[in-house]
Image (spheres, helix red, strand yellow):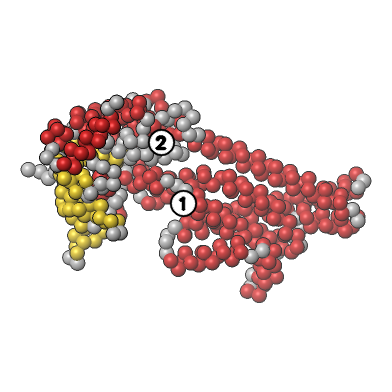
Amino acid sequence: MSAPMIEIKRVSKSFGPLQVLREVDLAVGRSEVVCLIGPSGSGKSTLLRCVNFLETYDSGDIRIDGRLIGYRDAAGGRQPMPARELREMRREIGMVFQHFNLWPHMSALQNVAEPLKRVRGLKPAEADERAEAMLKRVGLADKAGAYPGRLSGGQQQRVAIARALAMQPRLMLFDEPTSALDPELVGEVLEVMRDLAAEGMTMLIVTHEMGFAAHVADRIAFIDSGRIIDQGPPKKVFHESDEPRVRQFLQTYHDRNSF
Amino acid sequence: MSLQVFLHYLPSLLSGFGVTVLCWSAGSIIGLAVGFVVTLLNRLRFPPLHWLLRVYVEILRGTPFLMQLFLLYAGGPFIGLRLSATAAGIVGLGLYSSAYFAEIFRAGFAAVPQGQIEAAMSVGMRSWDILFRIRAPIALTATIPSIVNMLVILSKETVVLSIITVPELMYQMQTMAAETFTAFDAIFAMAVFYWILVEAVSRAGRRLEIKVTAFMAREAAA
């Protein structure tokens, strides 16, 4: 059996005296969609950010397609990975952020084309062509020339997804992609993500959209206080969990969302 | 003041205005360039260099421009630095303003949202590309109003150069006042020239700002 796309083994991390991840184990297979859920401050975003090493981890292993990210095991112990190698690995990992993080001085098209030119080394014409195709794919062909400040949150997030996808990553990370959006704009972003999942993209998603998680995820992992305390198919975690903390969290969620 | 007297001195006032514009623009270019380099070097986070640049900025911001100018012009020859009055004026203005520009740029860089840098890191961009394609353009856009403001201040700081006999507008005005005993008229003539300069600079700055920040309009079409 080939290695999982993401393999997280006994990963721990502290911010000073505060331990945010405690020996976390999690694997995401090829074409699998895994949603990380849990209360705020539980460490789910930190865990996601460790996967492309935007956040360092203190101990344990995170392997992408079998390759350790962020560190290199050397004779004298573990050493930071050379910057060039880290960049090579990050090219293969698409990331979508809660606050979109588009570059405000570039149009939608330029935002998508810039990494293709700088990182993939495409010629400007090729980069623009691929960027246009990507914008079309997320339904924004007509917004190519618009600057981020002129786009709605949902449109900005779709441009951000196009920017990540244009790099043709092997997997995608989503860090609360709809949390900063007005409720009526959430749907358009989730729809793009649903299509992506259907096409077989490997996805690790931190989200509070339980409905989306229930329908799209192959597996749900529930994090509390830096530990994965339950994981399994959505049906099992959402309806049959034995963990009181999971049941309590979901109960609160249901109470808040029913009126 | 009779029109005749004014016309008599017009050529020297115009030449003074030319020297003022030259010192101001050349000094500003030096200041912007040196200030930007100071900011970039500070970003290397190399402690001894950081400390040295801190001292540089603090000395230039913490002492009067007039004193710096005297030191450069009169003290320069003692360390083998012989500059003409105008050259000393330009270099002095450049160094003096570089400290302020460095602070403006530093604040601009600090204001770039970390998330936009992380987005660049997440696609695997090199630090060099992140600096010049992402960080610097966003930082510079944010600093345009402060830079224009500083340029306006500098255009008036050029009067100090008259003290070391740079034949700029103030110097010409003083000559005119001394020769004609018409202090008030001469000052008025000078004020008009400075006003023209300041107005031109701020107008150009506003246009630049509107042009460059047009895309920053937030949620205009949300």
Q: Residue at x 74, y 48 (%)?
A: B194
User: Looking at the rendering, in which quadrant would you find the C terminus of chain B?
Assistant: top left
Q: Amino acid at mark 2?
A: Gln
Chain of the residue displaying label 1: B
Can residue A60 be seen in the rendering of this structure?
yes
Asked if marks 2 and 1 fall on the same chain, the answer is: no
Going by the image, does B66 lie left or right of A170? Answer: right
Q: Amino acid at mark 1?
A: Ala
Going by the image, does A135 lie left or right of B11? Answer: left
Count residues near mark 1 (Cα–Cα under 10 Å), then give few for <14, some for 14-19, many for 20+.
Answer: few
Seen as rendered, the residue at the extreme bottom is: B78
Count residues near mark 2 (Cα–Cα under 10 Å), then give few for <14, some for 14-19, many for 20+.
Answer: many
Q: Residue at x 84, y 57 (%)?
A: B175
> Picture coordinates of residue B73 (x, y %)?
69, 67
Which residue corresponds to mark 1? Answer: B110
> Picture coordinates of residue A57 (x, y %)?
25, 54
Quarter of the view holding residue A82: bottom left
Disc nearest the viewer among 2 and 1:
1
Quarter of the view holding residue A166: top left
